[in-house]
């Protein structure tokens, strides 16, 4: 498809450039012949006429040779122009194709689990407790699919003006506290500590910012052992509100700091941990919609020897 488009675009660029150069050559020739069409002094008519004809012939020859040279050069230049013009389109198409493939795979897995649970439950008569357990597992799968669908829809709203229309002045402290997931009864998770060095006001969507910080907190809790600690710090920098989440997990593989924000990307060491690889992509999109920055880096900690630090920086607004 792209090869055919490049050929067509190359032909179009070539025709346009040759038409422009051809028209310019004719205009130059007509201009020169009109300007230098004068009456020579009496007695020198034949000599002047011959000289003018020789000059005009030389001009015609030069313009013709130049046009023939352009017939060779222009297609090559047009081909390079066509490739450069279609490069962003090709990259976007390939990214969309990978996104659709990854999304299809992510949906196929829970659907297979759901189908297996239902088939297993219907295979033979079971007790009420067994049916309840199967329904609960199926409900968990459906809830994961609902979240995946919501994440994909939110990612598809990139650049939507409706996101900015929901902005208001919110408190960084309130965003952090609202993003902490409730502890499930009987579950063990890492401890969470807070360090509020300030409470800078931020202009943004309370719901989206809570989702962004919540994703980072959930990631930190997911990868930190129950004996570890997740440390959350809120501070102010020059014109910026800073929210930092540090964990005692395994950290990021070397050189994967940027790839961590790619949709559906997951490190090889985390494949056994539940997730879809959309959390950080959502965080970056939400933070970018608020004109902020987000980064995740590995860092050494005294307690576990390895960990990750996620930092969100958002423009601070002046308190009234």
Image (cartoon, rainbow, N blue to C red):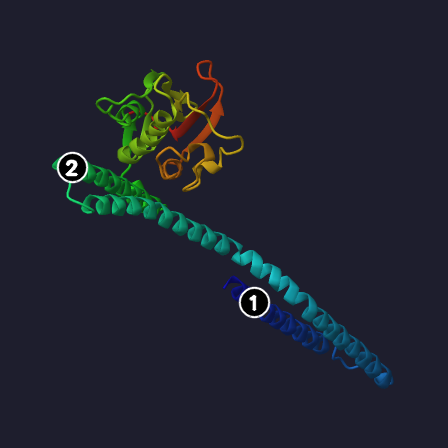
Res. 132 mark: 2
**In the rendered image, which quarter is residue 289 located in?**
top left
Q: Please state if 90 lies on the left or on the right of 221 as rendered.
A: right
Identity of the residue drawn at 52% across and 65% down: 5
Identity of the residue drawn at 29% across and 47% down: 111
Name the residue at the top extreme.
302
**In the rendered image, which quarter is residue 236 located in?**
top left
Q: Please state if 226 lies on the left or on the right of 117 as rendered.
A: right
Q: Position of residue 59 (x, y in %)?
A: 76, 74
Check the image and report above or below for 314 versus 163: above
Name the residue at the front extreme.
124
Label 2 residue SS: helix
Label 1 residue SS: helix
Check the image and report above or below for 291 versus 199: below
Mark 1, residue position: 7
Identity of the residue drawn at 26% across and 40% down: 141
Check the image and report above or below for 155 versus 53: above
Label 2, residues with CA under 10 Å away: few <14, some 14-19, many ≥20: few
Task: Inspect this view and state whether residue 162 appears.
Answer: no
Instruction: Say which label, 1 or 2, has the lower sequence index.
Output: 1
Q: Position of residue 80 (x, y in %)?
A: 61, 59
Q: Position of residue 165 (x, y in %)?
A: 28, 42
Using the image as rendered, state which of residue 124 and residue 139 is in the foreground: 124
Q: Please state if 169 lies on the left or on the right of 288 as rendered.
A: left
Identity of the residue drawn at 59% across and 60% down: 81
Distance from disc 1 to disc 2, alpha carbons, whole Å, reads: 61 Å
Res. 259 mark: none
Using the image as rendered, state which of residue 40 and residue 229 is in the foreground: 229
Using the image as rendered, state which of residue 317 and residue 283 is in the foreground: 283
Q: Position of residue 209 (x, y in %)?
A: 31, 32
Q: Please state if 223 lies on the left or on the right of 184 as rendered.
A: right
């Amino acid at each position: 498809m792209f090869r055919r488009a490049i050929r067509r675009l190359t032909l179009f660029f070539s025709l346009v450039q040759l038409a422009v150069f051809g028209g310019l050559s004719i205009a130059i020739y007509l201009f020169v012949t009109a300007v230098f069409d004068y009456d020579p002094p009496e007695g020198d008519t034949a000599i002047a006429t011959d000289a003018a004809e020789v000059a005009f012939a030389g001009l015609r020859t030069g313009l013709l040779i130049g046009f023939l040279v352009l017939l060779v050069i222009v297609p090559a230049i047009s081909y390079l122009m066509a490739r450069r013009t279609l490069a962003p389109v090709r990259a976007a198409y390939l990214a969309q194709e990978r996104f659709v493939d990854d999304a299809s795979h992510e949906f196929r897995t829970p659907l297979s689990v759901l189908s297996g649970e239902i088939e297993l439950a219907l295979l033979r008569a079971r007790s009420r407790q067994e049916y309840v357990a199967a329904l609960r597992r199926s409900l968990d799968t459906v809830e994961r699919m609902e979240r995946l669908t919501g994440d994909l829809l939110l990612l598809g709203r990139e650049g939507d003006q409706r996101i900015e229309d929901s902005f208001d002045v919110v408190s960084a402290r309130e965003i952090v506290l609202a993003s902490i997931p409730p502890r499930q009864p009987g579950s063990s998770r890492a401890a969470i500590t807070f360090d509020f060095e300030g409470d800078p006001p931020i202009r943004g969507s309370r719901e989206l910012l809570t989702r962004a910080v919540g994703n980072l907190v959930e990631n930190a809790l997911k990868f930190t052992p129950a004996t570890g600690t997740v440390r959350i710090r809120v501070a102010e920098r020059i014109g910026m509100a800073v929210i930092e989440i540090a964990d005692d997990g395994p950290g990021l593989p070397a050189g994967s700091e940027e790839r961590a924000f790619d949709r559906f990307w997951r490190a090889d060491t985390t494949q056994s941990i539940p997730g879809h690889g959309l959390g950080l992509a959502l965080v970056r999109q939400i933070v970018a919609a608020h004109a902020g920055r987000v980064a995740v880096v590995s860092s050494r900690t005294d307690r576990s020897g390895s960990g990750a630090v996620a930092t969100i920086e958002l423009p601070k607004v002046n308190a009234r």
